Structure formats: C-alpha cells, structure tokens
Image: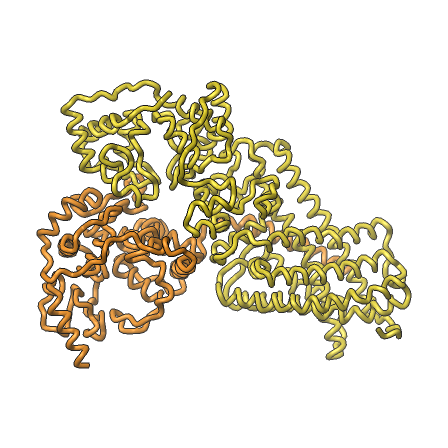
Amino acid sequence: MKTVIAICAALGLAIVTAAVVIDARRVTTASVSTEEYGRRLLTETSLLMGPDQPDESLRFTGSRLQCSSCHLKGGADPGTLSLLESDPKYPRPSGRDGVVGDMKLRLNGCMTRSMNGKALPLDSPEMNAMVAYIKTLNGRFKLMDASRKKAAEPQAFATPDRAANPAAGQKVFDARCARCHGNDGLGLRAENDPRRGYLYPPLWGPDSFNDGAGMHRVLTAARFIKARMPLGQADLSDDEAFDVAAFINVQPRPEMANLDKDYPDRSTKPVDNPYGPYVDPFPIEQHRLGPFKPIEAFYAKLKGAK
Amino acid sequence: MPAAATPLTDEDIEAFALMRAHAIALCIAGVAAAALTALSIAQVVHPGLTGDIAWLGAGRTRMAATALVVLGLLGNSSFIALYSIPTLARVVIRLRVGPWIFGLLNLVFAAPITVLALAGRLPQGPVLLVLSTLSASSGFGFFVSPLFYLPMWQTAALRTRLARSSMVVPVAQMVASVGLVVVVTVGGYTQLSQARDLNAGQLWLDALANSQGRLALIAWAVVFVGWAYVGVLSVLRRSVLPASFLPMGPLVKTAAVIGMLLPIPFIAPLWFATRSFSGPPALTPSESRGRVVFLREGCMTCHLPDADEVGFGPPLVNESGVRSTDWHFAHLYAPRAVTPRTPMPSFAHLFAGAADQPTQDARDLVMYLNAMGRTQDLGATEAKANDASKVRARRTGNVPEFPPPQNRADSLIQYRTYCVGCHGPKGEGDGPAAAGLRPRPANLAAHRYATEHAGAAIWNGVPGSAMSGWRNLPWYRVSALIDAVQSFGPQGDAGATQEPAERALGERVYAANCSQCHGEHGGGDGFSAASLPVAPANFQRQQPTLDYALQAIANGVEGTPMAPWGSRISASDMLAVAKYVRSFYAGGVR
C-alpha cells in the first residue's frame, strides 16, 4: 500500500519536475515545418537560406533573391507566377527532369536554378514548410471570392514574330526599369541589414538567377515582365517586354553545370530554351532571341510525325 | 440486474486501496492547481501585487498549474485504464498480478502523455505511433472499466439503496466511452497521417475542435462524472464498501472528495475551446499549433470566444488582419510596454529573450490570432467585414471630422495612455515596445502632420505597420491624440525655402528616383505605391524635418520599401531632394 502511494507520489513529482525542466528548455527559435515558416522562407529567402545565413547548414541559395522576387507577395498574388493554384498540379511530368515529379522536385528545380543554390533535402523542415505553405495557399484560393481570384494584369504577352532586339531592350530598360533595379541592373541592396538581400532584386550578376533558370528563357521572362512590370504600372507593350527580356537575358549571370543533361527527351525542350543541345537545326541564337515561329512550326511537325 | 452478490476478492481489495491512493494524489494535484490558478487570477486582477512586468517568470508557474491539471485529468482516466488491464489479465488469461503492475502501467500510460502534452511537442516517427497507440489504449480503458467495477458495485448495491438506484451510471459510461474511443483512435491517427510534426496536445485538442469533438467531450464528461460519482460515493458512504477498506479521517475524506471533483471545472474551458473561434477555412498546421498554445496558455480565461461576451480582455473573434505580427509579438512579450495600464500578463516565456525573437510557439499563436474571423477577411468587401464586429479596425474608409481638442494637458494624458508604448514619451518613436517593430513607430517629433492626416492614421491605422486603427476610441479622444501628435513636431516652417537652382536639381532627382512611389507631386500616390506593403510617405500631408529627410534618404527606412539611397545619389543631390520634398507640404495645422 505504502509502496503504491510512494510510486504515485514519486511519479507525480517526476512529471512536474520534467515539465519544469522541459519548460525551461523549450525556449528555442528552432523552426518547424509549418506553413508559417514556409511563408517566411518564400518572402525572406535571403535572410533564412541565403549565403549570409550565419548557420552554414542552412545556406541553401547561392543568389540573394527572394522567392517572392518573382512569385509576388509570396505567391499569394493571383496572376502570372502566382502559387495559389500550384498544389493540385503536382505530381506532373517534368520535361526538364524527364520524370513525373512532385512539388518537392519542382521546388528543388527552383533552388538549383532560379536561386542558384543547392537542392534541399527532401525531408528537411525547410522543404516540408514550403510545401505546407503552398498547399495552404491553394486552400485559401478555393475560399476566395471571384473578385479576389482575378489578377489585375494587362492582356497576356503575345510573341512578336521577329527576333528580339537587346539594343532596343536597353532603351526600355533605361527608361522604365533602371529606377528601381539600378542603371547597372544589379538591384538595390537593403544596406541597413545586408542579410535581407535586396529590396529591388538584381536582374543579372552574381546575386541573380543562373542560366538554367526558367526566367532565363526569353519568352518566360517577357510574359512575366508584360504582366507585372514596372511593378504597379504594368503597361509595357509586347515588343517592349520582348526586347527588354532579351536585354536582361544576354547579360552575364551565374552558370549552372551539366545543363546538357536537362530534357532527356530533347524533343520536349521549349522553343526558347537558351541552351542546347537541340533536336532541331536552328542556331542557338535563334533559341535565345527568336524569331520563334519557325521553331514552333518545326516542333509542331515533329509532334505530328510522332 | 443480477441480485446475487459477488464476494470481494483480494484483488478487489488491492484495487480499492489503489483507488484511495489515487484519490489522495488527485486531491494534492487539484488543490495545488486551484491555488496556482487563484494566484494567476490574483495577478491579473491586481497586477500591482507583483510589480509591473514581474509576470516574466510566471510562465513556469502557469506550466506547473497546467501540469497539475493535466495530472488530475489523466489521473482519473489512467486509473480506469490501469484497473481494467490487470483485471482483464486476471479474468482472461488467469495471470495474477500484484499492485506493482499499477505503478508500472501508470508510468507507461500517464507519464509520457502528460509530459508531452506539457512540452507541447511530440516526437516524430515510431515513437509517436507508440504514444498514440497508448493514448488510444486509455480510451479502451474508459470503455472496459465499468465492466470490471460493475461486479463490485453490485456488491455495494446489496448494502445501499443509493448504489442500487444508480446502476445506470456504469452503463451510461460504457455507452459514452464508445464514441470517445472512436475519436481518440480515428482522430488521432488521422491527425498523424496528415501532419507529421504537429503538436502533441493537438491530437487531443484538434479532435475536439469540431462537432464530433463536442460529442466526444460530452462522452468524456459522462465517463468522468460517472467515475467521480462512483468514487465520491465510495469515499463518503462507508456503507458502500466495507469499513476496513476505507480507514479515512474526515479531513482525508474531504480532501479526497475535493480532489476528485476539482478537475470538473476544467472541462468548461475545454468546452469553450470546441466552440468555433473561426469558421472555415480549416486551420493550417501553424494555426493549429497556435490554437494549442492559445489553450495551453489559458488565453480564453480572459478572451472569451463570443464577440458579445467581454471578459477581462477584449474578444478576439475578429482579430484577423487587424494588427501586425510585430505588434502582437511586442504586445505578448511585454503588454505594458505597449499599453501601460493593461491587465494582460506577459508571455515572455514564448520568446528567446526579446520581442523580435519569438519562438515557434509565439509565431504559431499569432498565426492563430490572425486566423480568427478570417472568413470575413477573405470575403473581400469591407461591408461584410464590418458587420462582424464593431471594434474591428477597418483599414480604409472615410475619416470623420473630429471636434477641436480640449487642452494640451489633457491631450498629453491621452497620449500617455494610448501611444507612449510605441511612440515614446517625446514622440520620437522610441517607446519601450518599439524595439521589435518593423517598420519603426513614426518619429512624431521629426514630422509636421496635417490634422486630417494624423486623424486618418489614428482612425484607420497604417497598413503594413504595427499602427492599428483606434476606432473604438471616442472621437474627443482621437482629437486629443491628434493634438498631442502635432505638439511634438516642429511648429514653424523653417528651412522650407530653397534656391531656384537647388530646387531645380531637387526636382530632377526626385522625378528620376522618387516619383514612382511618392508620386509626381509628393502625394504618396506614385504608380508603384499600390503594390508596396507599406504606403509611401505623403509629403503633402506630412513634412519631415530636414535632418530626418536626409537620414531617411541616406539610410532608408527599415521595414519599409524605402531603400537606402546613400550609395546611389551624391550628397548634393540628396540635400537638394530632401529640401524639395519638404516643399510639398500643403499645411493643415490648426
């Protein structure tokens, strides 16, 4: 009887002690993979995963961009490059990787290309957090009413039937882009806390996306520029967007290794893919700047032949 | 019901002895929990007892209180589980076990769950699976236990009318526990399969956060009250059980009864917890964790779940989008730094030493606060949002015309009540709560503000900053606050004149670098303005001092899209443009 009471008392004491000890140790800023962390990873990428992150094991990106540099408002803004509707699209076939990939594979595509960094371990808190966030976005999207879902964007970009002219693009850049991105295109650093990266992202140079990124494709860039830039006053014409995208993409930027391994099935390469090898006979310059009509016709025919 | 008495066995005697031990343990836990709760309430009601921010160390006190409450609750359930398992072993496989098995099983069942619930964290992987199975087994214990005390109860029923007439209790318990087992098992595993690394308490609390959860709670209450009834009756009515089993004095007896009944009031907050704070959308992982923190920290003691009921604290049902994350962190960390006379206790134990170093718990809690009333928030129109609550701070809309202020002394008193925490005693934006806020609170001493502009900022708040709308204040107070704000700034128009050549330079620099956000005429209405998280300064309505303007241009404004321009434009350009932006001011000071 006494033994039982003693056991109960000791147990109670042990639990309270353990609780107090755990309480004392629970003060930790360690992040867990919630969508809240995911949102911060997307909007404060440079601070949390960038080259200036004090914890070396968390330095995943090589650029100092944020995910939200392109996915505006952390992907929560409807329209071009919005992440609101991404979740249901995965898993899906990826031509670039040659496999059916899930969202994690896609995110690592961003990490190694647009962010010029290294792939996240698939089970890392960071990866899980970003996936959780993107899933949350979709849940929220479904509940938005129609007016909120509608993107405030001009008419979608239509590819001009000509080669892009980087020289003309430079004029557009100087007139419309340089105010924020700088005359040198290297962006505007947040100098009072350099770890936060840039207020206005660099469009080329060491802190920008590498040459394997989707944004390095002239049509992808032009679509984004037409829809979103200049921020708050997206009024560039198709020609201006096309030329300025070309101007940005002929500038120096980090290079990614083994790009020739991309697209195991080369016939799935996008027409504006800026690196070879290609199955078509067109020169690489034409893939970078256009005109794209002949290339599109070639691939349409190829597909028809299959 | 069978009339024949079942003779008590040695094992029954042992079990009743254990029941008594349990009653004593529960009693101790319950009394301590009650004392700690009373202490907490005392500190909230009379914060002076412990000094201004002396609550800092109270996290542990509160944890201990929670620990004891959980101990009390689990004590009850575990006993039922414990008693049933050895009995089952004895009946089914004829294994005779001594009292030691109870202690062992207590360790296996109650301890890990208790500790983890308190730690607010559950490990991942197989350990989690084992623990979930164990908690499900407790539910099994709920179900089977009445089966095994039923024979003893029948024995007692032969001796007392009371026991005879209440045979329905164990039956009701068995029925109710079926639902409970389903929720604990199915709900627990569903949670597990959906989100691997969520909170421990969440398994339990999330299951309660819906209508099935409420049914389960009712079931749980039936089981628990039934058990308390049987236990209390056994202690109080010596005739229920042979006298030799219960050699208790009146003191011990009273204590035992109190101990067994004490956990009942704690069912009430759980019931509140199941009432929906926010409708759909379903809580996200972070918000779910925040909900656990909300409940664990006892927030609903003061912040009642209904908009119409006002507890110690204001209702939080429409908190979504009202205040910035930074504001919540500063306020949770040191409430009186933000609002000097608030009875809100500090939750500094959710931070790693500073308001801008929140732990995941604090982040999750704020996520949860921001989820409350989100349905209205997502519903787009302002009208819809406004219907939800009178106190909800709307972010846009017309500003009423405020009456003239009474006198400067009164204005400053109002200022010290509402504003001083962030904006500081002299309006310099350096109040005790300012440290964690990004952007920093406005430096009122470095600006002249037009009356309507100050009024709009106070009435609507400043989107993107920690400044929330103060629409719940009477108009004459808003008026006094405007007066106080204007009293801090420079009174004259010194330095607004500019040499024509310098002005032309300023105009050029401004048009090239500033107008995309601040607008052609300094109205804060450039084409980029709408896309920015914080609205650009409207220089027609606020005029910075020259020093402030120069410093803002050179270093940027932290936490806003105002970038540091020091490296991009020359010192003379900067001076010219700083003077130029000051020339936009269109007045409006009374």
B584, B47: nearer the viewer: B584
Q: Is residue B191 above or below residue B348?
A: below
Q: Quadrant of residue B541?
A: top left
Left or right side of B219 for B372 = left
- Confirm whether residue B128 shows in the render: yes
Colour option used? by chain
- Confirm whether residue A129 shows in the render: no
The quadrant of the image that shows the C terminus of chain B is top left
Residue B32, percent from left and from top = 70, 47
Q: How many marks?
A: 0
Left or right side of A195 for A288 = left
A85, A116: nearer the viewer: A85
Q: Residue at x 73, y 66 (%)?
A: B173
Left or right side of A55 for B495 = left
B399, B507: nearer the viewer: B399
Instruction: Spot the orange chain and give its letter.
Output: A
Q: Residue at x 19, y 57 (%)?
A: A222
Q: Is residue B145 above or below residue A184?
A: below
Q: Is residue A249 above or below residue A101?
A: above
Residue B437, percent from left and from top = 41, 38
Determine the residue located farthest toward the bottom in the rendered image: A306
Q: What is the display colour for chain B? A: yellow
B554, A139: nearer the viewer: A139
Residue B215, percent from left and from top = 64, 62
Q: Quadrant of residue B504?
A: top left
Residue B309, percent from left and from top = 61, 43
The quadrant of the image that shows the N terminus of chain B is bottom right
Q: Residue at x 32, y 18 (%)?
A: B492
